Image: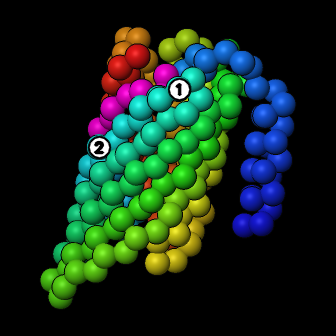
Amino acid sequence: MRILMIAALLLVQGAVYAQDAKKPALSYTYGEIRYVDVDDGGNGFELGGSYQFTANWYGVASLASLDFRNGVDVTNFEIGAGYVFPLQKDWDIQANARVIRTEVDTRFGSANETGIGLLGGVRGLLVPELEIRGNVHYVNVEESDVFLEFAGDWYITPQWAAGLSVEFGGDVDLWTIGARYYFK
């Protein structure tokens, strides 16, 4: 965990010096819907989005609803803000912080927890139609965990993209498939 934190800090420090003064070429203003499959027998949907306030600052929000075979339902709401470090024309380093609210409902009752999430990673275009992302997620809701995310989106049009993601970490692995609409 400490090695990941140190690596992330060194990466951010290097990005500050390499940062281009231009606006990022990738858009951070979008809405998306994703089907989520959790390896513990759960699945559901996630609605999310991002809005770019300035050339480098953006806001994020998402709402996920997951159902598990054992009668457990999980609702997760996240809201936060982030910063973009442009590296090259089509490559960015991004970081964000989020407040996370999770509600778990079972046949025996329900529980709510509030925590934080931190994300840092790289986002870029391999070719004009294919975007890839690699992120490290730190989540602390009731207990802390670190996830690695690898994702790719294929741009069907300049506004529409379809993609896959996979997240590994802690006790849970998940994958998603979904679509994004870019507003600018």
Name the quarter where the N terminus is drawn: bottom right
Indicate the quadrant where residue 101 lies. Answer: bottom left
Percent coordinates x, y for residue 160 in the rendering: 35, 19
Residue 156 at least partly seen: no
Tell which of 183 and 106 is nearer to you: 183
Q: Circle 1 sits in a helix, a strand or a loop, which is it?
A: loop
Name the quarter where the C terminus is drawn: top left
Instruction: Please give left or right for residue 63 compared with residue 118 in the image.
Output: left
Percent coordinates x, y for residue 83 in the rendering: 60, 38
Q: Which label was assigned to residue 54?
A: 1
Q: Which residues are magenta?
A: 27-35
Percent coordinates x, y for residue 124 in the rendering: 61, 25
Query: Label 1: few (<14), some or many (≥20) within 10 Å?
Result: few
At label 2, the amino acid type is Leu
Q: Residue at coordinates 29% horizontally, 38% vertically from top-left?
A: 33
Q: Residue at coordinates 41% horizontally, 35% vertically from top-left?
A: 50
Percent coordinates x, y for residue 95 in the rendering: 61, 43
At label 1, the amino acid type is Thr
Q: Which label was assigned to residue 47?
A: 2
Q: Which label was assigned to residue 86?
A: none
Instruction: Please give left or right for residue 158 compared with residue 127 in the image.
Output: left
Q: Circle 2 sits in a helix, a strand or a loop, which is it?
A: strand
Instruction: Please give left or right for residue 105 compared with residue 137 in the image.
Output: left
Callout 1 touching callout 2 (CB < 8 Å): no
Furthest toward the left, the residue is 107
Q: Residue at coordinates 19% horizontally, 85% vertically from top-left?
A: 109
Q: Mark 1 and mark 2: span between their CA atoms?
A: 23 Å
Q: Residue at coordinates 28% horizontally, 80% vertically from top-left?
A: 111
Reply above or below: 74 against 121.
Answer: below
Furthest toward the front, the residue is 54
Residue 184 at least partly seen: yes
